[in-house]
Image (cartoon, rainbow, N blue to C red):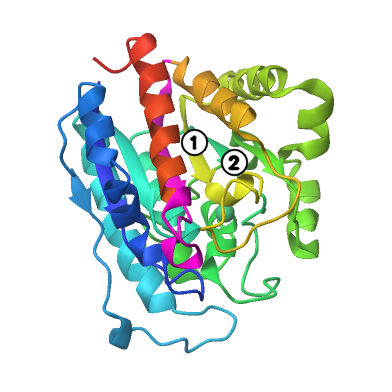
Amino acid sequence: MNIAYISVPYRYGQGKPGTEHGPAAVEEAGLFETLATHGQEAVRYGEAAVLPEDAVREEDAKLKRLEGVVHTTNDLQLLVRDALSEKRFPLLVGGDHSMAIGTIAGLRRSIPRLGAIWFDAHGDLNTPETSPTGNIHGMPLAVALGEGHQRLTEIGGTDVKLQPEHLVFIGLRDVDPGEQELIDRLGIRVYDMEAIRTRGMEAIMKEAIAYLNETTDAFYLSFDMDGLDPSLVEGTGTRVADGVMLEDAQTVLNSCAEQENFIAAEFVEVNPLLEEGNGTAILANALIGNLLQAMKNQHLVK
Ligand SMILES: [Mn+2]
């Protein structure tokens, strides 16, 4: 399978400048070399369109920079859809996590029963009503489940993009009250740090994938760098203590790569302005290398 690397250089889903430089930082860390090492063309398949800063205002405090998010996620869903229709594996680098609204909408076009593994410290399940910040990067999963502002839920079509039983959280540990209510009401599968510690990541990933395989046609991995332990990721905007360590993160990647119905991955929330050096982007590039190697071992990537 050929990789379609798609960059999403934007930050409008959250307030800190810097995630718009995430893709460039990962490229500087050697992304194109990583692609070439694993038999891929060292090229960018596409880059999601981003509105200039002066065209984006905060406007609604409960839904900040909405125009900027709508513009990019709408463009991104088309890129992802096209890549998938060409039988490519979309590999996305962001950008803040609100980009997943576009990723999921694009994948959903050809995968009606789409599954998602959400590697993240946060639930990303807020709506404008429940969000403590109004930042849309805390809302992409609510949007995918059909909850939230219509401008967002209608990106890529008016249908609901993701069913709650087609979603699994890995590494969750910072959940707002409204998010917990949604998790409980919809019965969403969660593997928190306690579960990872007591059962081990290997067993958890095996169970998570078996669970998704029961009812989905294919699944993708949404990898938020803040799912990792803060000691590993200085350059991400919302770090949370007691996170996933490197070996367990690699197990997540390897477990996904073993599956023939693993169809896309995104790495989000790289913010090089929050650290000296480029450590978080270097780590993201290394993790992408791990993933491609594991996929190559499974003959998913030629
Ligand atoms: Mn996130």
Q: Are marks 1 and 2 in contact (CB under 8 Å)?
A: yes
Nearer to me, 265 or 107: 265
Q: Is residue 22 in view from this perspective?
A: yes
Nearer to me, 5 or 293: 293
Nearer to me, 158 or 60: 60
Considering only vertical position in the picture, is 141 above or below 52?
A: above
Mark 2 residue crowding within 10 angstroms, few (<14) / some (14–19) / many (20+) = many
The residue at 30%/88% (across/down) is 54
Rendering coords of residue 294 (x, y %): 42, 17
Point out the tag, 1 or 2, that comes first from the N-terminus: 2
Asked whether mark 1 and ligand 1 are closer than 8 Å, the reply comes as no
Nearer to me, 147 or 266: 266
Magenta segment boundaries in residue numbering: 260-280
Rendering coords of residue 48 (x, y %): 26, 58
Position of the N terminus, as image quadrant, is top left
Q: Which residue bears the numbered disc 2?
A: 119
Considering only vertical position in the picture, is 84 above or below 134?
A: above
The residue at 76%/46% (across/down) is 242
Position of the C terminus, as image quadrant, is top left
Residue 214 location, quadrant? top right
Q: Which residue bears the numbered disc 1?
A: 221
Q: Which residue extends farthest front?
A: 276
Q: Which mark is residue 211?
A: none
Residue 25 magenta-drawn? no
Task: Assign a secondary structure to mark 2.
Answer: strand
